């Protein structure tokens, strides 16, 4: 038996030596097959899960990008269906992806990441306007505008990215349908770390967001599932908003469940006057004017202002000047949540509400303003203000919904001569410009007044912006848009109403 | 802006000295070429203004004349040029504006405008009395949402965008002008581009009280910043 063990031992040593030698002499990544970007689902149900189909379509050539190469050059060379693998290194560039079915995958080797560094000069790390886009495994830091921004691209997967101090938004799909945002870590973002803007059918899951003004924001979007996220040390943890003045006027059908929303007491460092600057620090979850929002099974803890705020547009923003934005949160469903030690040091407005309610001690949930047909389950568990009109919920859980992504990828948005400028306005401009509300840039109506009969002036400006307003972030160049398209979108912008 | 005029004055002195140096070789200056601002000459012109705006330029509500002393000089100059050229104050429903336009026409040339603006800028700043009531916090939100993109975060105005300072200007006067812009009594002339721009923005507030809220915010103690 001893001989047998010796033989096994020798064979084992040879095998270890072969593997180790290969590792030492060739490096850990040289022989590694390209990983297949398979989506890992947390459940075994057969319910819609379009993400696997999105990435499954990435079946073309593999293009490798090494330190010193340009990711943009690889994108330029890529054909739809190609996978671009980016190896560790420092990449100082903005990557524009304006073609469909491109997969960008960072290769992390021994904790060394491919890092896009904006050096506080560049505005965006990734800007995609294509459909069926995958971006994963990148470290993104020191940008002024956005980490990853989608501009009207459908069927997107944005995951496993590590985004630090990347400007106004960290991950920002704008006007896209059918997307997945998961397992990203984001911090130091001046507005929302994950901002789902004017989208439909998006899952946001397993992300960690901390040290931002807002952790996760679902804004003017429909059918969004926000689950298993860790939101802490932001001014506001998770936001579900209708912002008035955007082209898409509604937010509804949003599930916020199984998140850990903890200690969101960070100072609000949003641009003064912007709508996000009005988020009261110390707030776990805010629902502003959104409808059919379900809040379930979250741990909401140690948020000094209040655990959950439900409000209409008047209370938060006082800017409901968009007649097409219905200002009240309707049909909210507050299921079981664990809420501990919230509302210990609220902002002045909440303090006043507590005084008016003769309430002392902690405060879990506040509802102010209008809204109809909302309900709460087991209300006596919580310390609340303003829930007198809430009924007792009949629903107990949201198990029936495992994903809000669609079963099959959706087709790209149709573009033609008539609607292409509208698409650019929705997908690009409206990311920062609302009609009558200050988001990131000046309101559209202000731009209309300044340029009234001068669309060429806008077209020239967006190609070469000048930083005019100290209290606003610098406008990034949009010179990747064709000259005639810039003029068309300028004309479109001048005739937008609300 | 006062510094600017100091520089202009210094520049004027320098130019004068230079002119003296080359006195014999240089012909007399062309009268069309504008000289440096001279507040002393401006003081003489100001006598006309003082009739309505007061000896110290602090305004007189009974005369419909606002305080001038906190306005940025470029803004006063732009207003005078517009009134004098008929771009402002000639709408049939603008009685106060007509008075101002008549007075502006008494300034014989651009030099006179430059001089009187320099004199007004030399007058001591004095904050006007608050006459409106409203909600400061609401006003602040609306200001930043609607007005601040052009008039600046502190209401100090921007010369590059031709947006005048709103700080230290009588609230009743700003209220009236907002209403005049909305009624196209101001900003009616095709060449008054800044006026037309404001005319478009003058429908952006939901009601009169919101305007008052903004004006109260602009009068708040922390907003009393004299434009540089």
Image (cartoon, helix red, strand yellow):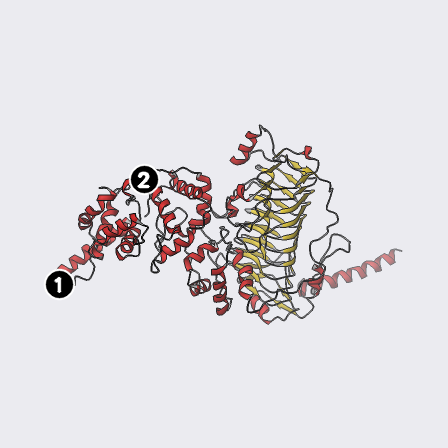
* Residue that badge 1 annotates: B28
Real-space CA distance between mark 1 and mark 2, rounded to the nearest whole angstrom: 45 Å
Q: Chain of mark 2?
A: B
- Tag 1 and tag 2 share a subunit: yes
The residue that appears at 47% across and 58% down in the rendered structure is A475
Rendered image: mark on residue B106: none
Marks 1 and 2, the one that precedes in the sequence: 1
Give x and y (percent) for residue A403.
71, 53
Determine the secondary structure under disc 2. loop
Rendered image: mark on residue B128: 2
Disc 2 crowd rating (10 Å Cα; few below 14, some 14-19, many 20+) is some
Viewer-nearest of discs 1 and 2? 2
Disc 1 crowd rating (10 Å Cα; few below 14, some 14-19, many 20+) is few
Q: Nearer the viewer, residue A318 or B158?
A: A318
Q: Nearer the viewer, residue B177 or A339?
A: B177
Left or right relative to A464: residue B14 = left
Q: Nearer the viewer, residue A284 or A314?
A: A314
């Amino acid at each position: 038996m001893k001989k047998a063990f010796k033989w096994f031992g020798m064979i084992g040593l040879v095998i270890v030596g072969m593997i180790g030698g290969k590792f030492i002499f060739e490096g850990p990544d040289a022989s590694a097959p390209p990983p297949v970007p398979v989506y890992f689902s947390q459940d075994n149900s057969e319910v819609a899960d379009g993400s696997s189909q999105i990435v499954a379509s990435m079946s073309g050539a593999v293009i490798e990008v090494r330190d010193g190469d340009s990711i943009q050059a690889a994108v330029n060379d890529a054909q739809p269906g190609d996978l671009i693998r980016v190896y560790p290194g420092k990449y100082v560039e903005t990557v524009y992806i304006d073609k469909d079915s491109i997969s960008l995958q960072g290769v992390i080797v021994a904790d060394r990441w491919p890092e896009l560094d904006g050096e506080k000069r560049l505005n965006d790390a990734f800007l995609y306007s294509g459909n069926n886009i995958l971006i994963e495994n990148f470290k993104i830091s020191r940008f002024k505008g956005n980490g990853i921004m989608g501009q009207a691209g459908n069927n997107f997967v944005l995951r496993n990215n590590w985004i630090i101090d990347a400007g106004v938004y960290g991950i920002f799909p704008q006007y896209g349908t059918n997307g997945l945002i998961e397992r990203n870590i984001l911090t130091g973002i001046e507005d929302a770390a994950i901002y789902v803007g004017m989208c439909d059918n998006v899952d946001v899951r397993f992300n960690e967001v901390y040290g931002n003004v807002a952790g996760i924001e679902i804004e003017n979007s429909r059918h969004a599932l926000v689950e298993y996220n860790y939101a802490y040390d932001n001014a506001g943890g998770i936001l579900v908003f209708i912002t008035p003045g955007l082209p898409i006027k509604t937010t509804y059908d949003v599930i916020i469940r199984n998140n850990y929303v903890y200690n969101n007491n960070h100072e609000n460092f949003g641009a003064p006057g912007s709508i996000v600057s009005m988020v009261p620090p110390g707030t776990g979850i805010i629902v502003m004017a959104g409808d059919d929002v379900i809040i379930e099974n979250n741990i909401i803890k140690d948020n000094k202002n209040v655990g959950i705020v439900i409000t209409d547009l008047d209370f938060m923003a006082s800017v409901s000047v968009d007649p097409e934005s219905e200002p009240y949160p309707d049909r909210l469903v507050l299921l079981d949540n664990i809420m501990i030690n919230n509302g210990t040091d609220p902002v002045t407005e909440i303090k006043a509400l507590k005084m008016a309610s003769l309430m002392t001690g902690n405060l879990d949930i506040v509802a102010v303003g209008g809204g109809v047909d909302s309900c709460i389950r087991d209300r006596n568990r919580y310390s609340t203000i303003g829930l007198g009109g809430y009924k007792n919920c009949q629903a107990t859980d949201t198990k029936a919904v495992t994903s809000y992504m669609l079963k099959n990828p959706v087709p790209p948005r149709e573009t033609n001569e008539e609607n292409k400028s509208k698409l650019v306005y929705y997908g690009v401009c409206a990311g920062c410009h609302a009609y009558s509300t200050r988001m990131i840039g000046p309101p559209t109506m202000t731009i209309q007044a300044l340029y009234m009969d001068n669309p060429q002036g806008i077209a020239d400006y967006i190609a070469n912006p000048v930083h005019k307003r100290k209290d606003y972030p610098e406008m990034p160049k949009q010179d990747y848009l064709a000259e005639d398209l810039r003029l068309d979108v300028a004309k479109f912008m001048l005739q937008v109403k609300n | 802006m006062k510094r600017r005029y100091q520089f202009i004055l210094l520049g004027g002195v320098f130019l004068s000295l230079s002119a003296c140096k080359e006195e014999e070789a240089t012909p007399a200056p062309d009268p069309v070429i504008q000289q440096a601002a001279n507040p002393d000459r401006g003081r003489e012109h100001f006598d006309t203004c003082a009739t309505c705006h007061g000896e110290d330029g602090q305004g007189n509500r009974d005369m419909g004349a606002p305080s001038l002393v906190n306005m940025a000089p470029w803004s006063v100059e732009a207003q005078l040029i517009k009134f004098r050229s008929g771009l402002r104050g000639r709408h049939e429903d603008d009685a106060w504006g007509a008075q101002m336009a008549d007075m502006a026409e008494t300034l014989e040339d651009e030099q006179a405008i430059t001089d009187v603006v320099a004199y007004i800028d030399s007058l001591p700043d004095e904050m006007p009395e608050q006459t409106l009531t409203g909600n400061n916090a609401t006003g602040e939100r609306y200001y930043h949402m609607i007005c601040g993109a052009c008039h600046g975060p502190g209401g100090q105005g921007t010369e590059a965008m031709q947006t005048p300072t709103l700080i230290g200007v009588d609230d009743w006067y700003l209220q009236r002008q907002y209403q005049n812009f909305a009624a196209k009594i101001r900003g009616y002339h095709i060449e008054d581009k800044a006026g037309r721009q404001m005319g478009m923005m003058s429908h952006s507030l939901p009601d009169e009280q919101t305007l008052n809220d903004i004006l109260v915010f602009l009068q708040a103690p922390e907003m009393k910043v004299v434009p540089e």
